[in-house]
Amino acid sequence: MEEFFRKPWVKVLVAVLALVLAMALVYAARAALAPFVIAFGLAYLFDPLIDKMETYRIGRTFSILSLFSLMTLAALAMTAFLTPLVAGQVEAVAKKTPMYIERLEKALAPVMENLAPEGGPNLGEKMKENLQGAGNLALVAMDTVGKGIWSGITGAMGIVVAVFNLAIIPVAAFYLLRDFDHIIAWGAQRVPPRLRERVFGLAKRLDQVMAGFVRGQLFVALIMSAVLSIGLLIIGVPMGFFLGALAGMANIVPFMPAVVGYLPAMALVYADGGGIGLYVAVSALFAISQALEGLVITPKIQGEATGLHPVAIMAAMLVGGVFFGFIGVLLAAPAAAMLKVLLEEADENYMASRFYTEGRPNGAPDDKPDGSPTSRTADKSDSRQGSKRYK
């Protein structure tokens, strides 16, 4: 029996089964694990900053408490400042909605007249009813969402779970952040010495990817939110501050700022009767901001972090949302980037394995050009040294 379990294919099968079982357990407990996943994400996000504060001989616990206090005060200040501003813009748009509907009806009147012979005499009335219904769609949606949220939290268990989650996230984040370096060191010590160089090198690459997608993308999104919201507010687009902030945060997903920011802004400019200058200003704002984001902001912040194709990011977010909801959407991009690094590592190991190279004549040149996975293996092995976090 022992010889049976020593066979390589048996070990691989057991490892795959264990991985599948672990993923199934995580999926089954996704709701209970969500607060801890968020807490770990916060700990990972702010650990470099706390490490930096420690270099100035500031105690780790005091640094964490100071950081959390500043974050709380900043969140309260932003809420107190932004809530009246956003509420005022939404209210102004709501008051102008009948005017927007009337203007849109006039714009569509020639189209309805041309379609009247085919659609019958009541086509115009039907179109008008649909437009009026579309005008009330936002209010109906907000009312529906509000009722759904209220019905979900009015139950005793819903309130308990919500309060527990709100309380456990900062508490768990505090303890994880305080012991983050010890946790990493504990895990590093469990790696067999013969594998540490390779594992630490892989961990360093994964950390660079996570830094690019978590810290980098979040910082880029905040900068883009500030630029677009202030820009649309100055231009005078109805509900521009809200649209700019939403478009900036959506910058995490490729092409989404145009969908959730640019198109609604242009539609509101048209409905508000804006001139050609407003169209040009809105278009210029989004074009310049996207150019700065792609050419200056992202390269400066993310550096050489491993990137993904935009289609891969959108597909990962779609799959993550289907399986894990909102948490899955947040974690989809960094998880996909980590998977890319692991697949690259697996590909390099495969290209250097006996299974691939077996039977090649001695001294035969590699059929892969420079820059291929096999030609990169030697270069990357020289740079695989454990960073501070992985020693």
Image (spheres, helix red, strand yellow):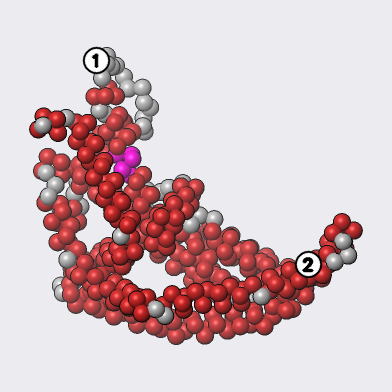
Please name the residue shown 37% across and 54% down the image: 334
Question: Residue at 61% across / 83% down in the picture?
Answer: 91
For image coordinates 24% across by 74% down, the residue present is: 171
Q: Quadrant of the N terminus?
A: top left
Relative depth, front residue between 100 and 64:
100
Indicate the position of residue 124 as horizontal and vertical percent values: 83, 67
Residue 214: where, in percent of width, then height? 36, 59
Dominant secondary structure of the residues highlighted in magenta in the image: helix
Q: Which mark is residue 127?
A: 2
Quarter of the rendering containing residue 215: bottom left
Horizontal placement of 75 versus 239: left or right? left
Q: Nearer the viewer, mark 1 or mark 2?
A: 2
Q: Which residues are magenta?
A: 341-345
Residue 227 spot, x, y in % from top left: 51, 69
- The amino acid beneath tag 2 is Met
Q: Is residue 45 visible?
A: no
